[in-house]
Image: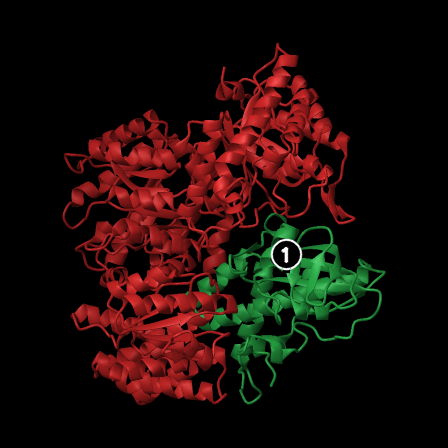
Amino acid sequence: MGFREDLITRPLIFDGAMGTALQKKALKIGALPERLCITDSKTIVDIHLSYLNAGSDIISTNTFGANALKLGDDVTHVISAAVACAKEARAIYLNQNPIQTNKYIALDVGPLGVLLSPMGTLSFDAAYDYYKEQAIAGENAGCDLILLETFTDLYEAKCAILACKEHTKLPVLCTMSFEATGRTFTGTDVETMVAVLEGLGTDAIGFNCSFGALEMLPLVRDAVKLTRCPIMVQPNAGLPKVINQITVYEKNLDVFKEMMNSYLELGVSILGGCCGTETEHIKIIKCAVEAHPYAGERRRAYVPVPRVASYSQTVNFGDRTIVIGERINPTGKKRLKEAILNRESDYILREAILQVEQGADILDINMGVPGIDEPSVMREIVTRIQSVLNVPLQIDASKVSSIEQGVRYYNGKPIINSVNGKRESLNQVLPIAKKYGACVIGLTLDESGIPSDAQGRFEIAQRIVNEAVKIGIPKENLFIDCLALTASAQQADVIETIKTIERVKRELQVATVLGVSNVSFGLPAREGINQSFLTLTLYAGLDAPIINPGHPHMMQAIAATEVLLNIDVNAKRYIETYGNMPKVENAVVTEEDPVTAFMYAIRNGLIDQAKQGIERLLLEKEPMEIVDKIIIPSLNQVGTEYENGKLFLPQLMQSAETVQAAFEILKTRLLEVGGAPINRGKVILATVYHDVHDIGKNIVKVVMENYGFQIFDLGKNVPPQVVVENCLKYDVKLIGLSALMTTTVVSMKETIHLLREKCANVTIVVGGAVLSEDIAHEIGADYFAKDASEMVKIATRFFES
Amino acid sequence: MAMNDVIKRYVSYEQILRYLHYNVNIKIGADLQEIIQEAIAETFSLVQFKSYFQCEPIIQTPMETWLMNCELGFKSQDLTSFLRGSSEMVLSGVTLGHTISKRIENRMLVKPSYGIILDACASVLADAYCDYIQDSWIENGTFSKYFLSQRYSPGYGDLSITENKVITKILNLEKNIGLYTTEHGQLIPEKSVIFVLGLSHTPFKAHLRTCGGACESCLLTHCTYRRG
């Protein structure tokens, strides 16, 4: 019988703390405890043996920090020695106790101590390689399983799990550390942790460290209700206290004992100890397990619920209508298509943020534009959205490689949009959903197209569900899209969509999604058709319409239908949303000269007036004339007032965002009429490598865009070679580099050096708190810009010369 | 009184305006004042105050300060001079968490004028939180037998910002409060502070908060607070 069989047969007992035992032996602060496996192996063997004698079924190797970041190229050596210590202890124990149950060795793996991008600086792939090295070394040395423990970042946990599962055959357990708030430091709650880690095929998930068994209990109570996956706990001995410069843990063995019994009654499968726990704690667990000998999950009642999650928020289907925002899809949207082609990720992020503010619960992300490296763009956008939003994402692509990139690098449990009834699609997409634990939308079409009748579409839905379940995808991860056809072309088939939704809900019992607005294509006054159709589908049982949340009539239709169907009990949400709506007043038609009014709006940061103003100006002027003769002089005036101390930063930025709003209207208009885009010159902006502060660079970007410069914003912490690659790729001759810290001026110098070497005739401007004219000169830059206005002046002179 | 309410008393409106390059000649309309108040309230709603400290006995040479319990120390004449007379040193890390940083990034995309105000509020709040912690040590008698110096952070004077890494390691800040230090000493979450202060049986001479006003020796030539 192996570990996985044991896990479903009986509760298993882990060991207690290694660090506490070593601390007792006066390990110095700063020394690496993992090296003791080589330098003092007897101590390590004795600690393992003491836990086996106390009743542990699983001992964990002394390898918590045995990664290349801490050990350099000594990882395999240290891990081999650590596993050898554990094996030696096990051999001694089995020799002394021949008739025993299995004893397992877990490779202990902790976080790397560096936060992953986008929150931190370490790339997912680099972190993956560190974990891969540890996992392979552990398996080769003879571990029976891998314990990933004390994670506070869900993304890092996902990365580590993938590395272990893709490079070993070992069972993988994963525990995270929570705060008293019920969240980890990076914001993950229990429901989200469970949704994501279970989906990745982790053999057991749970909690360790942070606090004692008593404080951990509420988290465990929540977790056991949310998953069918085995749950494990490794609490500290109690709450930590620092006495005489040493962290000690409150020790209350009676409470510990009571809690272990509670955990077993809740259905916990694996129990052990973390900081401060010793052999006496393991003996207590042993006694508790003897009183509760059956495997934990058998005692648990679990009701599966369709749920998707970001890193910090889980959306459950079924309680209310879930709105999936559809706007990040370039089909039929010239401005978005242009933004994707030009790497204007800020435009895409703004669209994402606005949709959430308008009420989207989930965002559909589609980067399908010809001529781009779609998988890498998908990855980049999915990663960037995570740095500013926490709604779950729906990865929408026809290319399988784009789907996999989006799902792999997403910090959460996404939806895949989509698979369909074609054999090729089923074979390619379902394994991705299974591997990453993603939900997946099944479209009711196959090699023969979309059946016009409900029966045909239902049969395809049934086939998709059966195929998915067959490969191990749980039913709650499947959503069916019954496909809306256009009323203008296939009027008789519209009702078939509604009938299909009813049958899928009733007979297949899976959730449904639907792209609603297709139905009105080709008809006038589309809003009315869309709204009525949406209401009918919701009545039929639609869980999640894919719509534009910026259309108030659609959002109101959802809210109203939920009232009428008694989902929104007492119309609470409806009244909250619509109870105090301000009366829409007619726009004031001003007789004022439109140029004066527009300039006044820019100076005073009046966005709505500026939007109205630009529409009026466009009736009589060309877009470039508006830019050159009105916007730029206005901005210059604002810039001068700022420099002279008559305005301060928020006022400067209010003007900037007013122009930003007007510019969007201009850009859209130019695209509509096929005019040349506004482009006064291409500029790369980047915060240099190792520097993570970019608010100054972002202010410069906003102001420069308002002057009509095309900005390639490479973000923060940008390696020199990435600046060079983009410079060559987009043929940019003016580069702006930012650094806030003295330590990163070195990176700036390296970037300048590489740019001089690889890119001919580039002009480099530097800025940031620690820079000056002298330093700029010293590190080889052409100019120093003290602020955004200065940068605009330099760029204007550069492109005019 | 709840901790948030106490910390609010340490938040300086003037400091926020200073971060935003305000001067007395600028008129701030009621709308903008309301927005700043809204930003202060939002900042409080998004921060997760976390702090951790440890007290270590030190020995000093003319140029260096060493922690007696481990093989780590700081090669900084300025810090050594700042701590002169101390027998122990408190090392501390504080953070406001990730949520506020994400919100600032979010607002910088759709409403940068608000984003920069939120950023200023968060920076001031991080300082206010440090002030609150220092005062609570005094009020609670945490180091009752000692006089406490003001705080000093890596990046001041000749104490390299990369020393943040050393302090993070000693305090195990990643695990204890979720505070990380990058390879070059920058802190993540961004709105975080690492500082040290000295404990002495005799009073300290320096009374000023933050960098002690030693602007002429500071490398931050464009610091908002630089004098002269």
The reply to whether residue A30 is visible in this rendering is: yes
Where does residue B105 sit, x and y in percent of width and height? 46, 63
Identify the residue at the far top of this view. A99
Where does residue A687 sit, x and y in percent of width and height? 42, 66
Q: Residue at x 59, y 38 (%)?
A: A35
Q: In this view, does A515 lie to the left or right of A583?
A: left
Q: The red chain is which one?
A: A
The reply to whether residue A269 is visible in this rendering is: no
Residue A220 position by quadrant:
top right
Residue type marked 1 = Ile
Image quarter (top left, top right, bottom left or bottom right) of the N terminus of chain B? bottom right
Where does residue A96 sit, x and y in percent of width and height? 66, 13
Give the labeled residue for mark 1: B167
Check the image and report above or below for A129 versus A165.
below
Image quarter (top left, top right, bottom left or bottom right) of the C terminus of chain B? bottom right
Q: Which residue is drawn at 46% across and 39% down?
A: A131
| A112 or A507: nearer the viewer | A112
Subunit under mark 1: B
Where does residue B120 sit, x and y in percent of width and height? 55, 71
Residue A640 position by quadrant:
bottom left
| A243 or A263: nearer the viewer | A243
Check the image and report above or below for A291 versus A607.
above
Query: For the residue labelled by badge 1, is the local secondary structure a helix, a strand or a loop?
Result: helix
Q: The green chain is which one?
A: B
Q: How is the image coloured?
A: by chain
Q: Residue at x 64, y 38 (%)?
A: A216
Q: In this view, does B166 lie to the left or right of A145?
A: right
